[in-house]
Amino acid sequence: MGRIREAIDRRAKSVAIERHYVDKDYRDTFANFHARKFSTPDSRCIRLHFFDQPINHVTTRERAVVQPHYLGYVVVRPTRPNCVGRTLLGPRACGLSGGHISLCSEQISLQGTTLDVSGFPFISQDTDVTVCAQSSLWMLARYFSNRYQSHPEIYPFQLADLTRDFSIGRVFPTSGLYIWQMAEALRQLRYSPLIYDRRRYSQVGDFEHLMYTYIESGIPILAAFENHVVVLFGHRSDFTSLQRDPPGQHHFIFSSQFNREFVGNDDNGFPYQILGGDPIARGMPYSIPQVQQFIAALPEKVFLPAENFQTVVTSLLRREDMGVQRLSPTLAPHGLILRLFLTTGRSFKKHLSSRGMGNSDVESIYRNLPLPHFIWVCEISRASEFPQRVLGEIIWDATRNPYEPDGWIALHYPELLIVDQGSALNGRQELLTIPLRSHTNYPIFENNLVGV
């Protein structure tokens, strides 16, 4: 509990204490494990609600008064040595500033007053039912169930019990999980997990690029060190080098190359810790190069992984018939910055009006274009516009396989828009080219992550 206090001490000005709190996650482990012990811990918890201004039992009745100052909650379990249970604190509660992170929301009730909080779920291991592997799995799963209705809520004992059929030794008390066991648990939860191993990537930065691409897609990852696992769900970039040294002609630079740090939760620490090139104060006691493997929990309907999308989209940009050099005089003389991410067709369309897409015809065509549930997007920009604005994008069907070179749905350059109306209507490729008489840059897509 001291770690949480250290994280929020400078921002929290008051705390509301909710005694005899029945926590659904702790009650799950209590009923299935702790209640079997001779020395049984209490079945109830304490929930602490933090505010950045002084409040009292009268002001808590007025939502309009207390909601702007609500920082989130921490459940304190009667377990030793780690008592921090289900926790959802906003990033400002822990002093995180700068960067982009995944967030989910919850609505809680404090003495009948409904309050909202957005953050990334956190829990510490209890060393019996959960250690770092189960805690990280729980944080990942709870994020998805809070954010998406299609993902059911799962509790700590249920999560640990998923490994019963492929465990090595006894299941409870747990001694931890191998990376493949964590992936199998996610598969049983109807994700499509992919395991990435650093040893398979010989080029410097390729492994980190894939970590960044999934996080940029709003897909938190489970990052494994030699004897520990954490969940990473955000990144922090430095674009000062971009201003000094723009990329050269006919050269592609991925936005991941400007990333300097990841943001995540280490169950041995506190929420929103930084993972950088070296261990830092108030950060994780590890560094990015020490990540040996990671798991990306893809949705079931995503068949094209990040590395394959990178290959096919860069090949398209270099093609003699469809590439930048042939079709875009605006982009051809410059080195290009490419930003890769996965999103849903629904989310992409939702933000068309606010972005403008550089041309009203592009916005109108995209609005009426059938899209698959998940799409890969490659945003195209130059040093003078990035990271705020872009000049075009490629939309790729995330259900295609990596051997289909024409799996793209739309190719948008400043001079023209090409859409595959054949695949959009479930037929053979039939390209429609729309010249664009005027074009401006437009904002990047920001719905996957939230800036802090």
Image (cartoon, rainbow, N blue to C red):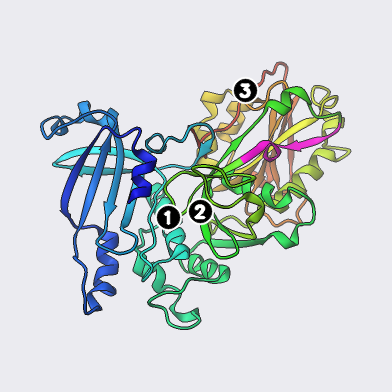
Comparing 220 with 48, the one in front is 48
Q: What stretch is highlighted in magenta?
A: 250-260
Residue 256 at x, y = what percent? Answer: 67, 40
Give, as a three-letter code, the residue at label 1: Met
Task: Give left or right: position of 432 versus 38.
Answer: right
Mark 1–mark 2 CB contact (< 8 Å): yes
Is residue 251 rendered magenta in the image? yes
Kindly report which numbered mark, 2 or 3, lies closer to the viewer in this rendering.
2
In whole angstroms, how far apart are the C-alphas of marks 1 and 3? 35 Å
State which quadrant residue 262 falls in: top right
Kindly report which numbered mark, 1 or 3, lies closer to the viewer in this rendering.
1
In whole angstroms, how far apart are the C-alphas of marks 1 and 2? 7 Å
Which of disc 3 and disc 2 is earlier in sequence? 2
Q: Residue 150 carries which label?
A: none
Q: Residue 231 carries which label?
A: 2
Q: Residue at (35%, 58%) from the top-left corner?
A: 153
Q: Residue at (86%, 29%) from the top-left corner?
A: 249
